[in-house]
Amino acid sequence: MLSRGAVRAHLLAGRLAGVVATAREESLRSYRLFAARDPRVTLGLDPEGDWTERDLIALMAEKCGVSADPGHVAGPDVIDPERTLSGLDAFADRLGEVAARRGAVLLGTGHPHRLLAFYAGLADALSAAGCLVLTPAQGRCVDITTRFGVRTYNLDYVRGVALMREGGARSAGSETGAHTHSPLPVRVALEDLAEGYGPLPDLVVGDHGWVCGAGQLGMEAIGLADTDDPALFVGEAEGRVAVAVPLDDAVRSDYYRPLTRYVLKRACLSQ
């Protein structure tokens, strides 16, 4: 089940790659907003280049396999499964490198409903290999701008993975968290570590603002990204994100389990 061919078939069957649920209209809107430097889609990254919408379409065609035709403006997006597999291989290699030297790792997600179990499996294996899985600033309040205005969230950890919760929504340690693109949580976590409450991470693993926010601050960061998340791929192109894996980041949680097993096997972290 862990062969490259089997994982490729799973990516297509589960629509993590191939024809995905993300609409071309959504992706193009994100590219336009990124070109305008809208913080909702730059995710904490301060791009060095002058990225136009056409530049971003070309980049995403190269990195993800979406259509390179600017005239293609509607319908589902497409992710090349070979690019996803290559991304997973590079992602696993980075994990293996940090595990070999028993480094410190910070994991966080803005997609807890979908991706928490994926990252938690990595955290468990890294911890078992002797890595320090960091949990800084637990319980800290973070004010995040949303479409409903500024709301206060709490930074929490589940099985070593950071996520944000709406204040008082659930007890700490439960597996329900908020969907967020904000880089503020990782900034708060890294600030806590920089103030002497733990070592800085050798690697940050996650998605959305966790990856771009960390990469912008000079941390090595790897993560998963959908076709409407150009910031991670721009960060990779500009050298501030080490690995961005293209896949649909909002399918059923259990569909990511084979990816966890594949990554851990390649990283020599299988338990």
Image (cartoon, rainbow, N blue to C red):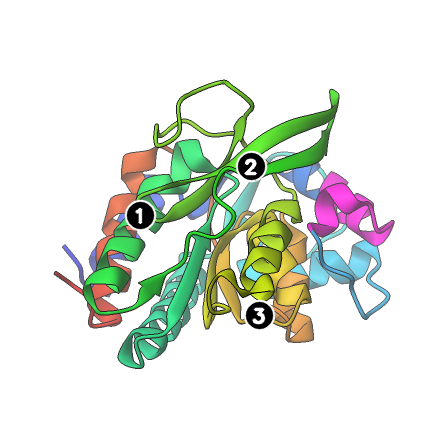
The foreground one among 166 and 209 is 166
Q: CA distance from mark 1 to mark 3?
A: 20 Å
Q: Is residue 53 magenta?
A: no
Q: Are marks 3 and 2 in contact (CB under 8 Å)?
A: no
Q: Which residue is mark 3?
A: 219
Q: CA distance from mark 2 to mark 1?
A: 25 Å
x 21%, y 68%: residue: 129
The foreground one among 239 and 204 is 204
Q: Residue 194, percent across and down?
A: 59, 65
- Is tag 1's residue or tag 3's residue first in the polypeptide sequence? 1
Q: Residue 34, percent across and down?
A: 78, 50
Main SS class of the magenta portion in the image: helix
Q: Is residue 177 above or below residue 67?
A: above
Q: Which residue is mark 1?
A: 120
Q: Is residue 39 magenta?
A: yes
In the image, 108: left or right of 46?
left
Q: Residues within 10 Å of mark 2 (few under 14, many from 20)?
A: some
Label 1 is placed on what type of residue? Answer: Ala
Label 3 secondary element: loop
Label 2 is placed on what type of residue? Answer: Thr
Q: Residue 22's mark?
A: 2
